[in-house]
Amino acid sequence: MTTQTYDRGTGKRKCAVAQVKLFSGSGEIIVNGKPYQEVFPHLEHRRNIELPFLATDTVGKFNAEVKVNGGGISGQAGAIRHGIARALAKANEQFKPLLRQEGLLTRDARVKERKKYGLKRARKAPQYTKR
């Protein structure tokens, strides 16, 4: 068994956490043991995942092996994007300014706001009645 060198990147978005291993290869992206096209049927999520490769012009040069859990499908796609961007920045320092310029290295800190007492949701108040 030959050990192949890889670069790691951890990506987070909402409640999803993605652990990415980046190998040199033909451009395959495996998510939880399946091709990413199976896991993410929507084109928008696929484009989101491919964005770091498009920004650095490395489409088809790296294989990504991803373990992702937590959150929903959009959060997981965002976490994978963040993880791939971090791994690419580690793989080649010249990619860092390109990824930073596209905003791919910044963790999207927006998470669901907690529900407050006396309200129906985080901010929705019950209907006001005068009488």
Image (cartoon, grey):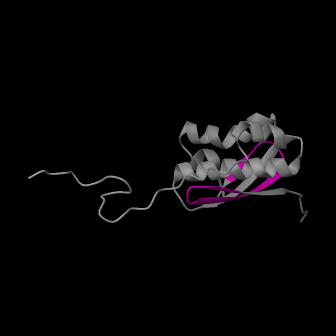
Quadrant including the N terminus: bottom right
Give yes or no for residue 27 being in the magenta stretch.
yes
- Residue 69 x, y percent position in the rendering: 59, 62
Q: Is residue 80 visible?
A: yes
Q: Residue furthest front?
A: 130
Q: Nearer the viewer, residue 120 or 8?
A: 120
Q: Is residue 61 visible?
A: no
Q: Is residue 55 left or right of residue 47?
A: right
Image location (x, y in percent) of residue 105: 73, 47
Q: Residue at x 61, y 41 (%)?
A: 46
Q: Is residue 73 above or below residue 53?
A: below
The image shows residue 38, relative to residue 14, as above or below, that is above
Q: Which residues are magenta?
A: 11-30
Image height of 40 relative to 20, above or below: above
User: What residue is shown at x 89% (from left), y 58% (from top)?
Assistant: 5
**Which x, y percent locates residue 107?**
66, 51
Determine the residue positioned at 56% across, 56% down.
Answer: 14
Magenta stretch contains residue 128: no
User: How many tags in the picture?
Assistant: 0
Q: Picture quarter containing residue 4? A: bottom right
Main SS of the magenta segment?
Answer: strand
> Which residue is at 51% across, 55% downward?
72
| Residue 68 appears left or right of 64 | left
Q: In the drawing, does residue 114 fall left or right of residue 105?
A: left
Compared across the picture, whether 75 is left or right of 58 comes to left
